[in-house]
Amino acid sequence: MKRNSPLLLAALLASLAIAACASPPASSPGGSDTPPESEPGTDLPGVASASAPTADAVIGRIRNTLTGVDPLAGNFAKAIAQVKPNLPQTANPVQATGLDQVPLLVYAACTDAKLATYSVPTTGTITANSAALVAAGMKMLDTGLASLATNGGSAGDFQAALQALVNTLAADKTTTQTMTTSFIAVCMASTTAAVAMVGF
Amino acid sequence: MLIRLKRTHKDAICHSHHSHDHDPSRRAFLRRGLTTGIATVVFPRILIKDAMAALPASCPQPVLAKGALAQIFSEGGPTMGARFIGDDQASTMNATMAANYGISGQANLVSIGNLRVDKTSPFGATLLQGPPGYTNAQWMAVLAKVSGGGHRGQFNQDDGAGVDTGLLGGASPFKSSQMGKDLRIANKNKLATWANGLPSSAVSTATPANMAKVFSLTPAAGTLTNSSAMNAAADGASALGQVLSRVFGLSNRKGGAEVLAATSCGFYGAAALADPNYGLNLFTPANVPALATMAAATSSTDAGGNTITNTFSTQELALLAAFYQSGAGVAGGVFIEYGGRDYHGQDPQNSIAPKDIEEARAIVMFLAACDKAQSKGALIYLSNGQAIADGAQQTNNTIGGNAVTLNSPVADGDAGGSYNAGLIVFYDPAGSPPAGKFTGTVDTNGNVKINPKIASSKDAVAGLYLSALQHIGADVGKATAAMQKLGVASSPSDLMLF
């Protein structure tokens, strides 16, 4: 037995080498091209999976994010009646469908929100009211995300993203944007992000 | 050592998926069902062009894959023998079988491909009359491109017993389309397990306005928004999403990239909805160039060349457009449930004949839509049960406003196990529909004996869907895998109907 050990070891090493060449690894930490199909989160030990918001979560978050909107009244209520069956029914982020409907529901809620509530003037140019529009967007993000937008280390990035949006609206040569269309655009961007782009 | 690189949505999807051996962008998205994200980036070509200009390359691009798929679920227990039957039933037709089926007899049977209908029955007469806007010769040419088949014997639960056994299926994402989702009309009962969660939009009543509402903004854009502002908002949301992705570590969390991409790409799709006519242009035949002339028609011709009244109902117009969008590759499948089809004891003239006419007209709309779209099509047609008949009686009814005298089934009692079938109708614009077949055998009384290889309605429904998907060139492998994951269709080859 002792005499055969080196041969056995060599055979074992050879077979391992062949196996390694013949089939791809089940998982490769360095090359994430081919992770195995598995349940969310199971291939990343210690790191939780993301989740998709389900229909009720979407509606609840929009209500929490926007001041003065009511899921039982106004355009928000009408849109819920139309869109709710088409919103995600599962929290599984890989299987969830219907996230495309979130901006449509957010739009309806944003038309219920009052500019005055966010100290945004209804008249004047977008450029002149740029700061108010950006502030409104930041307030919405903060309300929906526990003040994360202004207090976190990424405050400047959030602000910059909203400023870029307002600048685009102000410079729009295709359609002349009003304060109303601009407010709704800012509202849609901020609320959609807070509701459906956080991974939980 | 793990080196992290900044990735776009596209990269994230590609890298999180195991199939990297082919086109990683669109297919990966489709595989995830993320085409719902562009549900709205779609239809009228001019809108496609506009939307495409705004749609980032990282989002799945619209796919125009022709092929209509539809299902009619006739809930209850109608006289199935007075609808489509097979050649074997026709060739052995006798007085007893005809009475049990509720048809007039062998002399009045006519062929539609390898299917047979009683030309004097409400169902058969409606199919043969065809839609408004067609001459009889034109319609016969359409019917000549039809074949069919079915699984017989599994759909044997009358009344409410079998309605929730999963008799409604789904097509998206197995069938690629620009919308990436199905349209469900009045679907009230449980779907097949493998169809749960498939992307769809639902309406309770089929009208162009109801369908349009699913693809429109509430409230209407008016002075509140416009496509330019929506696109800017989508850009803004995507930028905010990138910041949030970093804050919440989405790139390290499985599914994070998918959620971000689906929401972001869907937002860009919403821009098209700022056009208040968007949904109406999809589901109003008068607004669909290929259907406009037909939609305006109020007559057709009969076999003798005479002009007859033939008008559309609002429901028929909606179905025509929906089927057309499925055929043209804009929509996934169209799934209709007709309730109250428990025929036993119902009045032949005022209840049974109108219901058979309504369903046959839906099939007519399906075939006409396939013809107009020049697309292959597959329509699945089933009920949970069946009523045995006690012959047929003469009734006076109208088909599209055309007054006709018919031989309508006299439904006797529930008899799910006597003769029932899950049927499929194939259409091929090139005139070469597949050689469809029936499973199960029929005795001299017309009673069916099930094929033991297809023991349950679950397998039969799966087989109908796999056959439909195969005919229109959809992803049968993907559908099979989804079914098998849930214990259905373990032997797909036994279930195929051609």
Image (spheres, coloured by chain):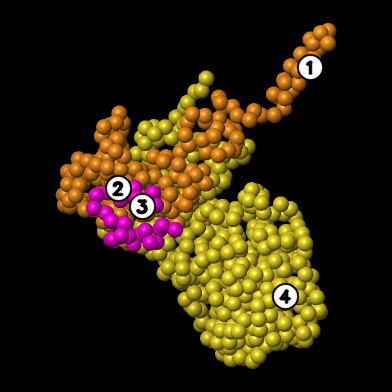
Q: Which chain carries label 4?
A: B
* The disc label shown at residue A11, or none: 1
Q: Which amino acid, mark 2?
A: Asn
* Residue at the spot 29% in from the left edge and 35% down from the top edge: A148
Q: Measured along the vertical axis of the image, is residue B464 above or below residue A107?
A: below
Q: Tell me where residue B175 appears, x and y as whole percent.
A: 59, 55
Discs 2 and 3 lie in a common subunit? yes
- Dot 4 falls on a residue whose secondary structure is loop
Circle 1 crowding by C-alpha within 10 Å: few under 14, some 14–19, many from 20: few
Q: Measured along the vertical axis of the image, is residue B69 above or below residue B122?
A: above
* The disc label shown at residue A183, or none: none
- Mark 1 touches mark 3? (CB < 8 Å): no
Circle 2 crowding by C-alpha within 10 Å: few under 14, some 14–19, many from 20: some
* The disc label shown at residue A59, or none: 3
Q: Indicate whether residue A60 is drawn in magenta.
A: yes
Name of the residue lying farthest toward the top: A3
- Dot 2 falls on a residue whose secondary structure is helix
**What colour denotes chain B?**
yellow
Q: Over which residues does the magenta segment extend?
A: A56-85
Q: Which chain carries label 2?
A: A
Q: Tell me where residue B32 appears, x and y as whole percent.
A: 54, 45
Q: Which amino acid, mark 1?
A: Ala
- Mark 2 touches mark 1? (CB < 8 Å): no
Q: How far apart are marks 1 and 3 (CA)?
A: 63 Å
Q: Which amino acid, mark 4?
A: Ser
Q: How far apart are marks 3 and 4 (CA)?
A: 49 Å
* The disc label shown at residue B418, or none: 4
Q: Quadrant of residue A154?
A: top left
Q: Nearer the viewer, mark 1 or mark 4?
A: 4
Name of the residue lying farthest toward the front: B161
